[in-house]
Amino acid sequence: MGTQTHGRVLIIAGSDSGGGAGIQADIKAVTALGGYAMTAITALTAQNTEGVHDVHPVPSPFLRWQIDVVVEDLGVDAIKTGMLHDADTIDCVVDLMRASGAGVPLIVDPVMVAQSGASLLDSGAVGAMVERLLPHAALLTPNLPEAEALLGRAVPDEAAMEQAARDLQAMTGGAVLLKGGHLPGNALRDVLIGPDGRTRRFQHARIHTRHTHGTGCTLASAIATGIAQGMPLDHAVARARDYLLEAIRTAPGLGAGGGPVNHCH
Ligand code: PLP
């Protein structure tokens, strides 16, 4: 893999045919922030703003093939994972990380359930994610329901968030950004625990809209882009949050359900 920093991000995630989340959101975020997006697709979804209508997994030998040909030719500065679908898919990423050594940072967005309620990760694969994938993660970006599934306990309020983030960090090889958007209230609070254990808090007024489809994918890919470009982690997170908030504010309002955010602002 390349040793120079070019902002090349390899995205390993699922396709959203509605263009709002998944690979499509990832490519838009990486491109908008000046990076170069490459993709290894784990599963196809037939999806629109109303929900995930069907899922068609990509066989893992073909997923490995997508990864291998890209890595050996174009080089990679950061790897970002989204929808991983099942334990075989998780193991493809684990093998990639083992082969690449410690050189390429891995950003794991532990996608489990779509906002519409559809399952994007086999419930039996959460253990594989915790035991095999998270130790390779330079950054983990769970929302609260994902944090609860990974920890196996409730994170009921803001007071519990910092300890939850610390416990999650102990499962990774790096940092954790725990996103508090699922808590009620008008203030949106995220907690970042750096690899050195340092805590940074981010806060913003909630934007009241139903058009937030793909926000998790967008934020993680925006952060991955900054990391691939050589930014310090807290700068990458701050830029990504600003980018996402503007994308939510200026969402085009498409579709009858939860519509996509706007990447071209
Ligand atoms: N579809 C795919 C392929 C995804 O990767 C994701 C999120 O990561 C989603 C749907 C869910 O997006 P949301 O929860 O914002 O609806």
Image (spheres, rainbow, N blue to C red):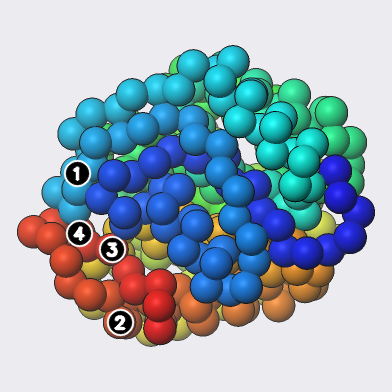
For residue 196, which quarter of the picture? bottom right
Placement of the N terminus among the 4 image quadrants: top right
Which residue is identified by label 2? 250
Check the image and name the residue furthest to the left: 256
Q: Earlier in the sequence, mark 2 or mark 3?
A: 2
Q: Residue at x 23, y 75 (%)?
A: 252
Q: Is residue 146 left or right of residue 31?
A: left
Cα distance, mark 2 to mark 4?
14 Å
Callout 1, which amino acid? Answer: Gly
Q: Earlier in the sequence, mark 3 or mark 1?
A: 1
Cα distance, mark 2 to mark 1?
22 Å
Which residue is identified by label 3? 260
Callout 4, which amino acid? Answer: Gly
Q: Position of residue 40 (x, y in %)?
A: 56, 37
Which residue is identified by label 4? 258
Which residue is identified by label 1? 51
